[in-house]
Image (cartoon, rainbow, N blue to C red):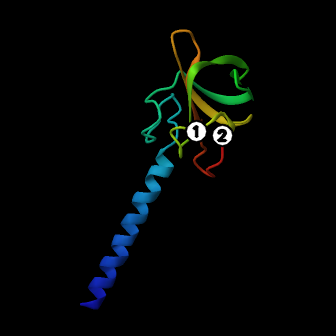
Amino acid sequence: MKIIKINSVIVGLTLLGMLLIVPIVSAQSDGVGRLVKETHYPARFERLGIINIIDRKGVVVDGVYISFSSHVQFMTPYDERSSLESFRPGQRVGYTLNKENQIVKLCLILKAKDGNS
């Protein structure tokens, strides 16, 4: 009877651990602008790329300058309402644009293997 209870606890803890790890790993880009899991991120991005330069007016991503909308929203996997200070050159991002081709959402994309951007 005790062996069955111990095995049940081990199985339960193992399943719980798997449930906690899967969202972290699956919250990465599938390579075509879609995110698999981050529910507060847009379903699609206009583009993914690496930040070259960033300031309060806009960002250069892969050599292309895009200005920020006056209502730009900065997001990280951990914070739906982040700030400009969360972003720096060398980080991978995805973004969405408005009709004026200004960024309305800038989202940090983490690398799957080490969690750093």
In percent of width and height, residue 98 lies at 52, 15
Which element carries disc 1, helix, strand or loop?
loop
Residue in the foreground of this view, choosing between 113 and 80: 80
The image quadrant that residue 40 belongs to is: top left
Q: CA distance from mark 2 to mark 1?
A: 7 Å
Horizontal and vertical percent for residue 95?
A: 56, 26
Location of the N terminus (image quadrant): bottom left
What residue is at 50 percent from the left and 35 percent from the top?
Answer: 30
Closer to the camera in the image, 84 or 48: 84
99 above or below 55?
above
In the image, residue 90 above or below residue 3: above
Q: Nearer the viewer, residue 42 or 7?
A: 42
For disc 1, the marked residue is 82
Three-letter residue code for mark 1 = Ser
How crowded pointer 2 is (Cα within 10 Å; few <14, some 14-19, many 20+) is rated as few
Mark number, residue 86? 2
- x and y, in percent, of residue 35 in the image: 47, 36
Q: Quadrant of residue 51?
A: top right
In the displayed orientation, state which residue is furthest to the bottom.
Answer: 2
- Give the vertical position of 115 relative to 64 (above or below): below
Secondary structure type for disc 2: helix
Furthest residue toward left? 1
- Vertical relation: 48 (above or below) 29: above
Foreground pick, 103 / 90: 103
**Residue 115 placed where, x, y %?**
61, 50
| Image quadrant occupied by the C terminus | top right
Q: Residues within 10 Å of mark 1 (few under 14, many from 20)?
A: some
The residue sitting at 42% across, 39% down in the picture is: 39
Residue 1 — which label?
A: none
**Marks 1 and 2: in contact by CB < 8 Å?**
yes
